[in-house]
């Protein structure tokens, strides 16, 4: 009986730990202007935040800490998020995996010269 109880508690702890990330928030902030090349964009990325506000603040702090003065949050997400840009367009995307998030960001950016600038999962 003691072994069964220990096994159940261990399984519950592992399940709880693995769902912790799924319950957290992520965010992307960028410092860009119309006409900027994607390679020169400043950005911040935050993950594992306990709330939307914390994710947003973390992304802004990360963006500003790189010397960017005009940062703005472009995406708050659960799961995975991506930001794609060209000199004229940008797009954001979310998904259960990085590939889906990047594909959606590229589709929203909608240009032959769009590239994924930043992506990741919380």
Image (cartoon, helix red, strand yellow):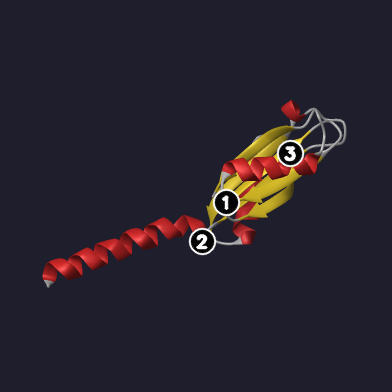
Place of residue 1 in the rendered image (x, y in percent of width and height, measured from the top left) = 12, 73
Residue extending farthest to the bottom is 1
Place of residue 65 in the rendered image (x, y in percent of width and height, measured from the top left) = 64, 39
- Quadrant for residue 13, please give it: bottom left
Q: Tell me the element at label 3.
A: helix
Query: Which of 92 and 97 lies nearest the eye of the viewer?
Result: 97
Q: Tell me the element at label 1.
A: loop
Is 117 drawn above or below residue 91 in the view shown? above
Query: Which of 21 and 93 lies nearest the eye of the viewer?
Result: 93
The residue labelled by disc 2 is 23
Question: For the residue carrying disc 2, how many other residues have a C-alpha within 10 Å: few (<14), some (14-19), or many (20+)?
Answer: some
User: Sequence order check: which comes first, mark 2 or mark 3?
Assistant: 2
User: Sequence order check: which comes first, mark 1 or mark 3?
Assistant: 1
Place of residue 95 in the rendered image (x, y in percent of width and height, measured from the top left) = 62, 50
Is 82 on the left or on the right of 13, as rendered?
right
* Residue lying at 24% horizontally and 67% vertically, measured from the top left: 8
Question: For the residue carrying disc 3, how many other residues have a C-alpha within 10 Å: few (<14), some (14-19), or many (20+)?
Answer: many
Q: Tell me the element at label 2.
A: helix
Whole-Å distance between the Cαs marked 2 and 1? 13 Å
Question: For the residue carrying disc 1, how many other residues have a C-alpha within 10 Å: few (<14), some (14-19), or many (20+)?
Answer: few
Whole-Å distance between the Cαs marked 1 and 3? 16 Å
* Residue lying at 51% horizontally and 61% vertically, measured from the top left: 23
* Residue lying at 72% horizontally and 50% vertically, measured from the top left: 73
User: Sequence order check: which comes first, mark 2 or mark 1?
Assistant: 2
- Quadrant for residue 76, please give it: bottom right
Mark whose residue sits in front, 2 or 1: 1
Whole-Å distance between the Cαs marked 2 and 3? 26 Å
Is 6 on the left or on the right of 102, as rendered?
left
Label annotation for residue 106: 3
The residue labelled by disc 1 is 96
């Amino acid at each position: 009986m003691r072994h069964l109880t220990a096994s159940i508690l261990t399984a519950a702890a592992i399940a709880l730990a693995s769902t912790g990330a799924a319950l957290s928030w992520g965010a992307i902030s960028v410092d860009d202007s119309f006409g900027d090349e994607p390679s020169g964009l400043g950005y911040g990325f935050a993950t594992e935040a306990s709330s939307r506000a914390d994710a947003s603040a973390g992304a802004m702090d990360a963006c500003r800490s790189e010397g960017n003065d005009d940062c703005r949050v472009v995406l708050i997400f659960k799961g995975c998020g991506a930001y794609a840009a060209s000199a004229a367009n940008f797009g954001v995307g979310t998904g259960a995996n990085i590939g889906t998030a990047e594909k959606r960001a590229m589709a929203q950016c909608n240009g032959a010269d769009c590239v994924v600038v930043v992506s990741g999962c919380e």
